[in-house]
Image: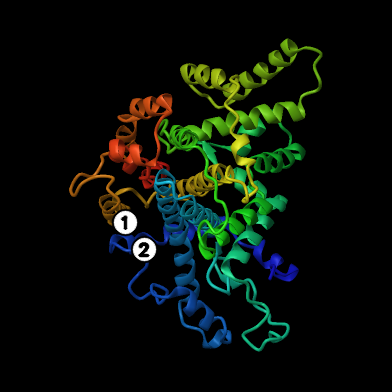
Amino acid sequence: MAIRPDDLKVLEKANINSLKLAFGNLYDNLTDEGFLHSSNFLSDDAASIIDKQYSKKPRKRKKKLHRNVSEYIAASSLLHNMDGWTYFGQAIVSLLRGDFNTAKHLLYYSELRSCMSFLASNGIGVFNSRHLIINKNGKVVLINDKVPNPHPNGRGSDNKIGTHDFTWDALNNIINCDKTLKIVFDNYFIEGISLNDWLGKFEVNESYKLTIARRFLKLLSFDIEYFAGDKDARNQASYRPTNIIQNNSVEYNIILKDIKKIWEFSKPIGRKGEISIDITLLSELLQMAFKYTQPFQKSFKAANKQYNARLNRMLDSFGISQSRKDQLKKYFNQTHENIYEPMSLVNFKKPEFIRGIIYRSFLFLRLSNTYNKTIISNNSNISKDNLSFWWRPLGVNFGLWEENGDPEDFQDLWEDIDMYADDLNDIIQQNNYCTSSFWKKHSNLAFLLGTCNRIGLWGLGI
Protein backbone atom coordinates (compact mmCIF):
# COMPACT_ATOMS: atom_id res chain seq x y z
CA MET A 1 0.00 0.00 0.00
CA ALA A 2 1.05 3.61 -0.55
CA ILE A 3 1.89 6.11 2.19
CA ARG A 4 -1.33 7.76 3.34
CA PRO A 5 -1.73 11.56 3.09
CA ASP A 6 -1.77 11.92 6.89
CA ASP A 7 1.48 9.98 7.10
CA LEU A 8 3.09 12.20 4.47
CA LYS A 9 2.62 15.15 6.85
CA VAL A 10 4.64 13.27 9.46
CA LEU A 11 7.26 12.25 6.87
CA GLU A 12 7.86 15.88 5.95
CA LYS A 13 8.81 16.65 9.55
CA ALA A 14 11.97 14.54 9.27
CA ASN A 15 14.92 16.79 10.08
CA ILE A 16 18.38 16.42 8.56
CA ASN A 17 19.99 18.63 11.22
CA SER A 18 18.71 16.32 13.96
CA LEU A 19 20.16 13.40 12.02
CA LYS A 20 23.54 15.14 11.84
CA LEU A 21 23.46 15.62 15.61
CA ALA A 22 22.54 11.97 16.10
CA PHE A 23 25.51 10.96 13.95
CA GLY A 24 27.78 13.10 16.11
CA ASN A 25 26.37 11.34 19.17
CA LEU A 26 27.85 8.10 17.82
CA TYR A 27 31.29 9.32 18.90
CA ASP A 28 31.20 7.63 22.31
CA ASN A 29 30.18 4.36 20.67
CA LEU A 30 32.95 4.65 18.07
CA THR A 31 35.60 4.95 20.76
CA ASP A 32 34.40 1.52 21.95
CA GLU A 33 34.76 0.30 18.35
CA GLY A 34 31.10 -0.02 17.47
CA PHE A 35 28.35 2.04 15.87
CA LEU A 36 25.88 1.19 18.62
CA HIS A 37 26.50 0.91 22.34
CA SER A 38 26.27 -2.59 23.77
CA SER A 39 23.17 -1.49 25.69
CA ASN A 40 21.35 -0.44 22.52
CA PHE A 41 18.60 -3.02 22.19
CA LEU A 42 18.38 -2.39 18.42
CA SER A 43 21.75 -4.01 17.78
CA ASP A 44 19.98 -7.31 17.06
CA ASP A 45 16.85 -7.75 14.91
CA ALA A 46 16.00 -4.04 14.91
CA ALA A 47 12.96 -4.29 12.62
CA SER A 48 11.17 -6.81 14.85
CA ILE A 49 11.95 -4.82 18.00
CA ILE A 50 10.68 -1.61 16.39
CA ASP A 51 7.48 -3.39 15.37
CA LYS A 52 6.93 -4.67 18.91
CA GLN A 53 7.82 -1.40 20.67
CA TYR A 54 5.57 0.75 18.53
CA SER A 55 2.69 -1.67 18.89
CA LYS A 56 2.69 -0.75 22.60
CA LYS A 57 1.41 2.41 24.24
CA PRO A 58 4.15 5.03 24.78
CA ARG A 59 4.37 4.55 28.56
CA LYS A 60 5.09 0.85 28.06
CA ARG A 61 7.89 1.36 25.57
CA LYS A 62 11.53 0.85 26.50
CA LYS A 63 13.57 3.67 28.03
CA LYS A 64 16.05 5.51 25.82
CA LEU A 65 13.98 4.54 22.77
CA HIS A 66 14.46 7.94 21.09
CA ARG A 67 18.25 7.94 21.50
CA ASN A 68 18.68 4.30 20.50
CA VAL A 69 16.53 4.65 17.39
CA SER A 70 18.09 7.96 16.29
CA GLU A 71 21.60 6.52 16.64
CA TYR A 72 20.54 3.43 14.70
CA ILE A 73 19.14 5.57 11.86
CA ALA A 74 22.29 7.73 11.84
CA ALA A 75 24.59 4.71 11.62
CA SER A 76 22.41 3.11 8.94
CA SER A 77 22.90 6.12 6.64
CA LEU A 78 26.58 5.20 6.28
CA LEU A 79 26.20 1.43 6.37
CA HIS A 80 23.34 1.14 3.90
CA ASN A 81 25.42 3.09 1.40
CA MET A 82 28.46 0.83 1.77
CA ASP A 83 26.23 -2.24 1.45
CA GLY A 84 24.92 -0.70 -1.77
CA TRP A 85 28.47 -0.41 -3.13
CA THR A 86 28.96 -4.09 -2.25
CA TYR A 87 25.88 -5.12 -4.24
CA PHE A 88 26.99 -2.89 -7.11
CA GLY A 89 30.46 -4.44 -7.24
CA GLN A 90 29.03 -7.95 -7.23
CA ALA A 91 26.68 -6.91 -10.05
CA ILE A 92 29.72 -5.79 -12.09
CA VAL A 93 31.31 -9.21 -11.54
CA SER A 94 28.05 -10.92 -12.57
CA LEU A 95 27.95 -8.87 -15.79
CA LEU A 96 31.52 -9.81 -16.57
CA ARG A 97 30.50 -13.45 -16.08
CA GLY A 98 27.59 -13.03 -18.48
CA ASP A 99 25.04 -13.52 -15.68
CA PHE A 100 22.63 -10.68 -16.48
CA ASN A 101 19.78 -11.94 -14.29
CA THR A 102 21.85 -11.98 -11.13
CA ALA A 103 23.22 -8.54 -12.08
CA LYS A 104 19.66 -7.15 -12.33
CA HIS A 105 18.84 -8.57 -8.89
CA LEU A 106 21.95 -7.06 -7.32
CA LEU A 107 21.62 -3.69 -9.05
CA TYR A 108 18.05 -3.29 -7.84
CA TYR A 109 19.14 -4.00 -4.26
CA SER A 110 22.00 -1.56 -4.71
CA GLU A 111 19.40 1.08 -5.63
CA LEU A 112 17.21 0.10 -2.69
CA ARG A 113 20.08 0.37 -0.20
CA SER A 114 21.12 3.70 -1.73
CA CYS A 115 17.60 4.98 -1.23
CA MET A 116 17.46 3.69 2.37
CA SER A 117 20.79 5.43 3.03
CA PHE A 118 19.53 8.64 1.44
CA LEU A 119 16.33 8.54 3.50
CA ALA A 120 18.27 7.83 6.70
CA SER A 121 20.52 10.81 5.93
CA ASN A 122 17.36 12.92 5.83
CA GLY A 123 16.20 11.59 9.20
CA ILE A 124 13.91 8.83 7.91
CA GLY A 125 14.41 5.29 9.20
CA VAL A 126 13.19 2.43 7.02
CA PHE A 127 12.48 -0.81 8.86
CA ASN A 128 10.04 -3.62 8.08
CA SER A 129 6.44 -2.47 8.26
CA ARG A 130 6.74 0.44 10.70
CA HIS A 131 8.94 3.38 9.79
CA LEU A 132 10.23 6.33 11.81
CA ILE A 133 11.48 9.89 11.50
CA ILE A 134 13.69 12.07 13.68
CA ASN A 135 11.99 15.46 14.04
CA LYS A 136 13.52 18.90 14.65
CA ASN A 137 13.48 18.29 18.41
CA GLY A 138 15.49 15.07 18.05
CA LYS A 139 12.45 12.98 18.95
CA VAL A 140 11.62 9.81 17.09
CA VAL A 141 8.10 9.70 15.65
CA LEU A 142 6.32 6.74 14.07
CA ILE A 143 5.15 7.64 10.57
CA ASN A 144 2.30 5.16 10.23
CA ASP A 145 1.14 5.51 13.83
CA LYS A 146 -2.63 5.69 13.71
CA VAL A 147 -4.46 2.50 12.84
CA PRO A 148 -7.81 3.45 11.29
CA ASN A 149 -9.19 -0.08 10.84
CA PRO A 150 -8.09 -3.67 11.28
CA HIS A 151 -6.74 -5.23 8.12
CA PRO A 152 -9.60 -7.03 6.30
CA ASN A 153 -7.74 -10.35 6.21
CA GLY A 154 -7.22 -10.23 9.96
CA ARG A 155 -3.43 -10.08 9.74
CA GLY A 156 -2.01 -6.98 11.34
CA SER A 157 -3.28 -3.54 10.47
CA ASP A 158 -3.69 -1.63 7.25
CA ASN A 159 -1.30 1.12 8.31
CA LYS A 160 1.71 -1.12 7.79
CA ILE A 161 3.77 -0.39 4.68
CA GLY A 162 6.43 -2.82 3.46
CA THR A 163 10.07 -1.84 3.06
CA HIS A 164 10.09 -1.58 -0.74
CA ASP A 165 6.81 0.34 -1.09
CA PHE A 166 7.66 2.74 1.70
CA THR A 167 11.19 3.40 0.46
CA TRP A 168 10.17 4.40 -3.05
CA ASP A 169 7.09 6.34 -1.91
CA ALA A 170 9.21 8.31 0.56
CA LEU A 171 11.74 9.11 -2.17
CA ASN A 172 8.94 10.25 -4.46
CA ASN A 173 7.70 12.60 -1.75
CA ILE A 174 11.16 14.13 -1.30
CA ILE A 175 11.58 14.75 -5.03
CA ASN A 176 8.13 16.31 -5.36
CA CYS A 177 8.17 18.41 -2.18
CA ASP A 178 9.78 21.85 -2.59
CA LYS A 179 11.07 21.96 0.99
CA THR A 180 12.81 18.58 0.88
CA LEU A 181 14.10 19.00 -2.67
CA LYS A 182 15.84 22.20 -1.61
CA ILE A 183 17.49 20.25 1.23
CA VAL A 184 18.91 17.80 -1.35
CA PHE A 185 20.64 20.63 -3.23
CA ASP A 186 21.77 22.20 0.05
CA ASN A 187 23.61 19.02 1.01
CA TYR A 188 25.31 17.99 -2.24
CA PHE A 189 28.71 19.68 -2.10
CA ILE A 190 31.23 20.05 -4.93
CA GLU A 191 34.49 21.87 -4.28
CA GLY A 192 33.10 22.47 -0.78
CA ILE A 193 30.16 24.45 -2.25
CA SER A 194 26.54 23.24 -2.26
CA LEU A 195 24.65 22.83 -5.53
CA ASN A 196 22.21 25.42 -4.23
CA ASP A 197 25.02 27.96 -3.81
CA TRP A 198 26.49 27.11 -7.21
CA LEU A 199 23.11 27.90 -8.80
CA GLY A 200 22.65 31.02 -6.70
CA LYS A 201 26.02 32.49 -7.67
CA PHE A 202 25.26 31.54 -11.27
CA GLU A 203 22.44 34.08 -10.95
CA VAL A 204 19.57 31.60 -10.89
CA ASN A 205 16.81 33.06 -8.74
CA GLU A 206 14.91 31.03 -6.15
CA SER A 207 11.79 30.64 -8.28
CA TYR A 208 13.80 28.81 -10.99
CA LYS A 209 16.04 26.72 -8.73
CA LEU A 210 13.47 24.10 -7.80
CA THR A 211 12.20 23.79 -11.36
CA ILE A 212 15.73 23.24 -12.63
CA ALA A 213 16.51 20.82 -9.80
CA ARG A 214 13.43 18.74 -10.56
CA ARG A 215 14.13 18.65 -14.31
CA PHE A 216 17.73 17.75 -13.65
CA LEU A 217 16.82 14.82 -11.38
CA LYS A 218 14.31 13.67 -13.98
CA LEU A 219 17.06 13.65 -16.62
CA LEU A 220 19.20 11.59 -14.26
CA SER A 221 16.32 9.08 -14.01
CA PHE A 222 15.45 9.88 -10.38
CA ASP A 223 11.87 9.01 -11.19
CA ILE A 224 9.65 6.67 -9.21
CA GLU A 225 8.38 5.05 -12.42
CA TYR A 226 11.91 4.10 -13.48
CA PHE A 227 12.69 2.58 -10.08
CA ALA A 228 9.39 0.67 -10.24
CA GLY A 229 10.57 -0.79 -13.56
CA ASP A 230 13.86 -1.75 -11.94
CA LYS A 231 11.89 -3.56 -9.23
CA ASP A 232 9.91 -5.42 -11.90
CA ALA A 233 13.19 -6.51 -13.45
CA ARG A 234 14.35 -7.73 -10.04
CA ASN A 235 11.13 -9.73 -9.66
CA GLN A 236 11.69 -11.41 -13.02
CA ALA A 237 15.33 -12.16 -12.21
CA SER A 238 14.70 -13.33 -8.65
CA TYR A 239 11.53 -15.41 -8.95
CA ARG A 240 11.31 -16.70 -12.53
CA PRO A 241 13.38 -19.48 -14.12
CA THR A 242 16.33 -18.08 -16.04
CA ASN A 243 15.91 -18.39 -19.83
CA ILE A 244 12.31 -19.62 -19.60
CA ILE A 245 11.97 -17.27 -22.53
CA GLN A 246 14.65 -16.07 -24.95
CA ASN A 247 17.07 -13.99 -22.92
CA ASN A 248 19.23 -11.98 -25.29
CA SER A 249 22.22 -10.23 -23.76
CA VAL A 250 24.12 -7.08 -24.62
CA GLU A 251 27.35 -7.39 -26.57
CA TYR A 252 30.26 -8.06 -24.18
CA ASN A 253 32.31 -5.13 -25.45
CA ILE A 254 29.46 -2.69 -24.75
CA ILE A 255 29.31 -3.91 -21.15
CA LEU A 256 33.08 -3.43 -20.85
CA LYS A 257 32.73 0.14 -22.16
CA ASP A 258 30.01 0.93 -19.61
CA ILE A 259 32.05 -0.51 -16.74
CA LYS A 260 35.07 1.51 -17.92
CA LYS A 261 32.93 4.68 -17.98
CA ILE A 262 31.66 4.01 -14.44
CA TRP A 263 35.25 3.78 -13.18
CA GLU A 264 36.23 6.94 -15.07
CA PHE A 265 33.32 8.74 -13.39
CA SER A 266 34.55 7.39 -10.04
CA LYS A 267 38.08 8.78 -10.21
CA PRO A 268 38.83 10.81 -7.06
CA ILE A 269 39.60 14.49 -7.63
CA GLY A 270 40.74 17.00 -5.03
CA ARG A 271 40.87 16.22 -1.32
CA LYS A 272 37.26 16.73 -0.26
CA GLY A 273 35.81 13.43 -1.43
CA GLU A 274 34.73 14.64 -4.86
CA ILE A 275 34.86 12.27 -7.80
CA SER A 276 34.80 12.92 -11.52
CA ILE A 277 31.04 12.49 -11.95
CA ASP A 278 30.44 15.38 -9.52
CA ILE A 279 32.11 17.92 -11.78
CA THR A 280 30.38 16.43 -14.84
CA LEU A 281 26.98 16.74 -13.15
CA LEU A 282 27.74 20.30 -12.03
CA SER A 283 28.71 21.25 -15.58
CA GLU A 284 25.50 19.71 -16.94
CA LEU A 285 23.47 21.51 -14.27
CA LEU A 286 24.97 24.92 -15.07
CA GLN A 287 24.46 24.46 -18.80
CA MET A 288 20.85 23.45 -18.21
CA ALA A 289 20.31 26.39 -15.87
CA PHE A 290 21.66 28.79 -18.48
CA LYS A 291 19.33 27.45 -21.17
CA TYR A 292 16.28 27.85 -18.92
CA THR A 293 17.07 31.26 -17.46
CA GLN A 294 18.95 33.21 -20.12
CA PRO A 295 16.92 35.35 -22.54
CA PHE A 296 17.07 34.08 -26.10
CA GLN A 297 20.15 35.21 -28.02
CA LYS A 298 20.23 35.64 -31.77
CA SER A 299 23.57 33.89 -32.16
CA PHE A 300 25.62 31.18 -30.47
CA LYS A 301 28.46 33.68 -30.09
CA ALA A 302 26.28 36.08 -28.10
CA ALA A 303 24.89 33.29 -25.91
CA ASN A 304 28.37 31.89 -25.29
CA LYS A 305 29.60 35.35 -24.26
CA GLN A 306 26.74 35.68 -21.76
CA TYR A 307 27.34 32.15 -20.41
CA ASN A 308 31.03 32.78 -19.79
CA ALA A 309 30.35 36.15 -18.20
CA ARG A 310 28.06 34.42 -15.69
CA LEU A 311 30.68 31.73 -15.13
CA ASN A 312 33.31 34.37 -14.39
CA ARG A 313 31.11 36.20 -11.88
CA MET A 314 30.21 32.91 -10.20
CA LEU A 315 33.78 31.65 -9.89
CA ASP A 316 35.06 35.05 -8.72
CA SER A 317 32.47 35.08 -5.92
CA PHE A 318 33.82 31.80 -4.51
CA GLY A 319 37.39 33.02 -4.28
CA ILE A 320 38.70 30.02 -6.22
CA SER A 321 42.36 30.18 -7.24
CA GLN A 322 43.04 31.38 -10.77
CA SER A 323 44.49 28.04 -11.90
CA ARG A 324 41.47 26.12 -10.60
CA LYS A 325 39.13 28.75 -11.99
CA ASP A 326 40.66 28.28 -15.45
CA GLN A 327 40.30 24.48 -15.16
CA LEU A 328 36.65 24.66 -14.13
CA LYS A 329 35.75 27.26 -16.73
CA LYS A 330 37.27 25.09 -19.45
CA TYR A 331 35.36 22.07 -18.19
CA PHE A 332 32.07 23.98 -17.89
CA ASN A 333 32.40 24.91 -21.57
CA GLN A 334 32.83 21.34 -22.77
CA THR A 335 30.16 19.22 -24.37
CA HIS A 336 30.20 16.06 -22.31
CA GLU A 337 29.54 12.58 -23.50
CA ASN A 338 25.81 11.97 -23.33
CA ILE A 339 25.36 10.49 -19.86
CA TYR A 340 21.58 10.56 -20.19
CA GLU A 341 21.33 8.10 -23.08
CA PRO A 342 21.98 4.87 -21.15
CA MET A 343 19.87 6.04 -18.21
CA SER A 344 16.87 6.36 -20.53
CA LEU A 345 16.90 2.59 -21.11
CA VAL A 346 14.04 1.71 -18.79
CA ASN A 347 12.14 -1.10 -20.56
CA PHE A 348 13.14 -4.13 -18.51
CA LYS A 349 11.91 -6.49 -21.23
CA LYS A 350 14.70 -5.37 -23.56
CA PRO A 351 18.34 -6.54 -23.25
CA GLU A 352 19.65 -2.97 -23.21
CA PHE A 353 17.80 -2.34 -19.94
CA ILE A 354 20.81 -3.64 -18.02
CA ARG A 355 22.85 -0.65 -19.20
CA GLY A 356 20.29 1.78 -17.80
CA ILE A 357 20.10 0.22 -14.37
CA ILE A 358 23.93 0.22 -14.10
CA TYR A 359 24.01 4.01 -14.43
CA ARG A 360 20.90 4.64 -12.31
CA SER A 361 22.32 2.52 -9.52
CA PHE A 362 25.72 4.24 -9.72
CA LEU A 363 24.26 7.74 -9.56
CA PHE A 364 22.02 6.90 -6.63
CA LEU A 365 24.99 5.40 -4.79
CA ARG A 366 26.92 8.61 -5.34
CA LEU A 367 24.03 10.78 -4.16
CA SER A 368 23.72 8.90 -0.87
CA ASN A 369 27.52 8.70 -0.61
CA THR A 370 27.94 12.47 -0.84
CA TYR A 371 25.19 12.94 1.75
CA ASN A 372 27.25 10.81 4.13
CA LYS A 373 30.30 12.88 3.27
CA THR A 374 28.36 16.02 4.27
CA ILE A 375 27.13 14.47 7.53
CA ILE A 376 30.65 13.40 8.54
CA SER A 377 32.15 16.77 7.62
CA ASN A 378 29.55 18.45 9.88
CA ASN A 379 30.80 16.43 12.84
CA SER A 380 34.43 17.32 13.58
CA ASN A 381 34.59 14.62 16.26
CA ILE A 382 34.05 11.88 13.64
CA SER A 383 37.21 10.96 11.74
CA LYS A 384 38.84 8.28 9.67
CA ASP A 385 40.69 7.08 12.77
CA ASN A 386 37.67 6.50 14.98
CA LEU A 387 35.87 4.76 12.11
CA SER A 388 38.84 2.44 11.51
CA PHE A 389 37.20 -0.43 13.41
CA TRP A 390 34.69 -0.46 10.52
CA TRP A 391 36.67 0.28 7.37
CA ARG A 392 39.84 -1.65 8.23
CA PRO A 393 38.31 -5.18 8.25
CA LEU A 394 36.03 -4.17 5.38
CA GLY A 395 39.03 -3.36 3.17
CA VAL A 396 40.82 -6.59 4.09
CA ASN A 397 37.73 -8.77 3.64
CA PHE A 398 36.89 -7.32 0.23
CA GLY A 399 40.50 -7.48 -0.97
CA LEU A 400 41.13 -3.74 -1.17
CA TRP A 401 44.37 -4.15 0.79
CA GLU A 402 46.24 -6.79 2.75
CA GLU A 403 46.29 -7.24 6.52
CA ASN A 404 48.22 -4.33 8.11
CA GLY A 405 48.33 -2.65 4.70
CA ASP A 406 45.95 0.24 5.47
CA PRO A 407 46.09 3.04 2.86
CA GLU A 408 47.36 6.35 4.18
CA ASP A 409 44.70 8.02 2.07
CA PHE A 410 41.68 6.25 0.55
CA GLN A 411 42.37 8.08 -2.71
CA ASP A 412 45.53 5.97 -3.00
CA LEU A 413 43.20 3.04 -3.79
CA TRP A 414 42.71 4.58 -7.24
CA GLU A 415 46.22 3.47 -8.20
CA ASP A 416 45.08 -0.18 -8.38
CA ILE A 417 42.45 0.75 -10.96
CA ASP A 418 44.63 3.20 -12.86
CA MET A 419 47.36 0.58 -13.24
CA TYR A 420 45.04 -1.50 -15.44
CA ALA A 421 43.53 1.41 -17.43
CA ASP A 422 45.66 0.79 -20.52
CA ASP A 423 44.89 -2.94 -20.42
CA LEU A 424 41.16 -2.26 -20.34
CA ASN A 425 41.44 0.21 -23.21
CA ASP A 426 43.34 -2.38 -25.28
CA ILE A 427 40.72 -5.04 -24.53
CA ILE A 428 37.94 -2.75 -25.68
CA GLN A 429 39.88 -1.72 -28.80
CA GLN A 430 40.45 -5.35 -29.77
CA ASN A 431 36.71 -6.04 -29.45
CA ASN A 432 37.15 -9.81 -29.62
CA TYR A 433 36.62 -10.89 -26.04
CA CYS A 434 33.88 -13.07 -24.63
CA THR A 435 33.21 -14.19 -21.05
CA SER A 436 35.58 -17.15 -21.25
CA SER A 437 38.54 -15.38 -22.86
CA PHE A 438 38.25 -12.33 -20.62
CA TRP A 439 38.33 -14.33 -17.39
CA LYS A 440 41.08 -16.67 -18.59
CA LYS A 441 43.38 -13.81 -19.56
CA HIS A 442 42.32 -10.99 -17.20
CA SER A 443 40.95 -12.48 -13.98
CA ASN A 444 42.91 -9.96 -11.87
CA LEU A 445 41.34 -7.09 -13.77
CA ALA A 446 37.89 -8.67 -13.44
CA PHE A 447 38.34 -8.87 -9.68
CA LEU A 448 39.46 -5.24 -9.42
CA LEU A 449 36.55 -3.94 -11.50
CA GLY A 450 34.20 -5.44 -8.91
CA THR A 451 35.87 -3.81 -5.89
CA CYS A 452 33.49 -0.85 -5.87
CA ASN A 453 33.57 -0.42 -2.09
CA ARG A 454 36.75 1.61 -2.67
CA ILE A 455 34.60 4.24 -4.43
CA GLY A 456 32.38 4.48 -1.36
CA LEU A 457 35.43 4.93 0.87
CA TRP A 458 37.25 7.67 -1.05
CA GLY A 459 33.91 9.36 -1.71
CA LEU A 460 33.51 10.04 2.03
CA GLY A 461 36.39 12.51 2.02
CA ILE A 462 37.93 11.20 5.25
The picture places residue 355, in percent across and down from the top left corner, at: 55, 42
Q: Between 23 and 441, which is closer to the camera in this rendering?
A: 441
How was the colour assigned to the protein in this rendering?
rainbow
Could you tell me which secondary element the residue under label 2 belongs to?
loop
| Mark closer to the observer (1, 2) | 1
Which residue is at the far left? 404
**Image-based side of 384 in relation to 324, left or right:** left
Q: Which residue is mark 1?
A: 390
Q: Residue at x 46, y 33 (%)?
A: 253
Given residues 342 and 135, the one toward you in this image is 342
Snapshot quadrant of residue 442: top left
* Residue 203 - label: none
Q: Position of residue 268 (x, y in %)?
A: 41, 34
The reply to whether dot 1 and dot 2 touch (C-beta < 8 Å) is: yes
Which secondary structure lies at badge 1?
helix
Amino acid on which the number 1 mark rests in the picture:
Trp
